[in-house]
Amino acid sequence: MGTTDSPASNNPGGNSSHSSKQVNSQRVDYWSQLLKTITAESDAAAGWVGQVRSKATAIAQELALPSTRDEDWRFTDLSPLLGIEFSVAGAITTPAITATDVTLEEAPNSRIVFVNGRHAPDLSDLSALGELADKVTVSAWSAGHDSVLNATVESTLGKIQTSAEAFTALNTAAVNQVVVISVARNATIELPIHVVFLSAGAGAIAQPRCLITVGSNSRCTVLEEHRALGSTSDANAPYWVNGVTEVALADNAEIHHARIQRDTSTAFHIGNTAVSQARDSRYTLTSLDAGARVSRHNVAVSQKGPGTHTAFNGLNVATERHTSDTHTFLNLQHPHGTADHLHKCVASDRGHTVFNGRVFVGQQAQQTDAAQLNRNLLLSSKARVDTKPQLEIIADDVKCTHGATVSQLEDNEIFYLRSRGLDETAARRLLLDGFVGEILERLPVQSLRLPLAKAIAAQIRAIS
């Protein structure tokens, strides 16, 4: 597990206080300028949208870019952002990608695509959902435009994921276009719904927003994918994705939400996922974070009724000098709730993975059954893992467990495989496939499993 140095250890001259104030001032100024840029370039909006933006802007104005002195960010350094002047991502007139490149085998005609936070109808295809119009709506909602979804968006946007978190406030302060997925009551949607967020552009910041509501007694699968636009002239230039996804489940609703992040190695990615679960609902999140120079995914789930079930399946992969961070918070406040969380991290080269999993069991959450396990694999002596599973229990009639392990590929396992005819590289790859495969096999979209496994193997140079 990783450790952090005290501030004084990096400044033997004794000027740590002055240095700290200087750095903090820089973060405040940077954040203030970024907020001005984002709000100045957003489309004007009146009514409730304007009120939502104004509230978020007011919150953001009181904040600054988080630093490692903040408890929630002490293992993830965002200072590389300070050296980049970001601007709001513009439209891509000649995208280096076609509809074929974003087509999923299981959902070729149930796909909505956004490029740099803006709807791309030429890459989207929702024709397969046409005959299900009475059961599910998938649309790009825009602020200030008449829409049948206005009531749904107004009643839900910002209600699940509050703007108190800095990056959520930044996103909400300029919220404009939103992917809205609304499943009616008593509906079963067998076809996966594919949401693709593509990003590109030197120094561009994109702020995608997704809102998912699932009616009572309904079921659906949503795949949320974040990745680079493709081969562009500035493919190696940094960009920043700051996304927010909100999910609301009614009584006895069920969703399998898969989230895949594969941005470029120069990108920055911060995502916030917030979920509200009503009585007897079931939420499953299977996530993969295997891209970006610095990535952070915050997941907050509130069980707001008895008999709810939450399942997390997570995988973080960090190579080179990249940081991949996942923070989860599960809030149980009602009886008979269950939760199952398996999170894995792989770090190679000088890669750094961070996991913080917090489970809070309130006084009323009697007979809760919750389990959390974080398993970490280090493939290099210079790789680093920071893990912090947290279990806070107020109730007295519960069954809760949590734990974490950090290990390397075992020599005896490699020896065994070599004794069966494999060379060392093949043996190490097979063991890695087994480690990551446990999470990839839980993806609800089978066609992605093998390509993702191959991509991860190619990404981890330490095994080649």
Image (spheres, rainbow, N blue to C red):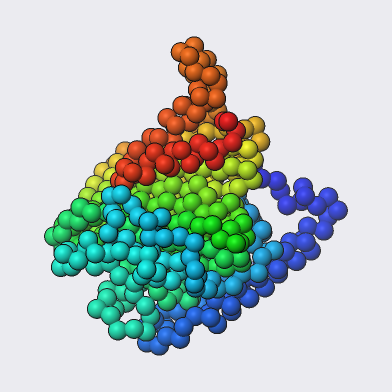
Across and down, in percent, residue 431 comes to 47, 27
Q: Is residue 335 visible from the viewing direction of this image?
A: no
**Number of numbered discs on residues:** 0
Against 447, residue 83 (above or below) is: below
State the residue at coordinates (59%, 42%): 319
* 293 or 360, nearer to the observer: 293
- Indicate the position of residue 362 as horizontal and vertical percent values: 35, 52
Residue 392 image position (x, y, % from top left): 42, 47
Name, please, the residue furthest toward the right.
Answer: 13
Q: Up-down: is 51 above or below 4?
A: below
- 75 vs 133, left or right, is right
Judge by depth and name the residue closer to the eye, 319 or 57. 319
Depth check: give the residue in front, 43 or 76.
43
Name the image quarter holding the C terminus: top right
Q: Is residue 239 above or below residue 401?
A: below
Q: Residue at x 62, y 57 (%)?
A: 236
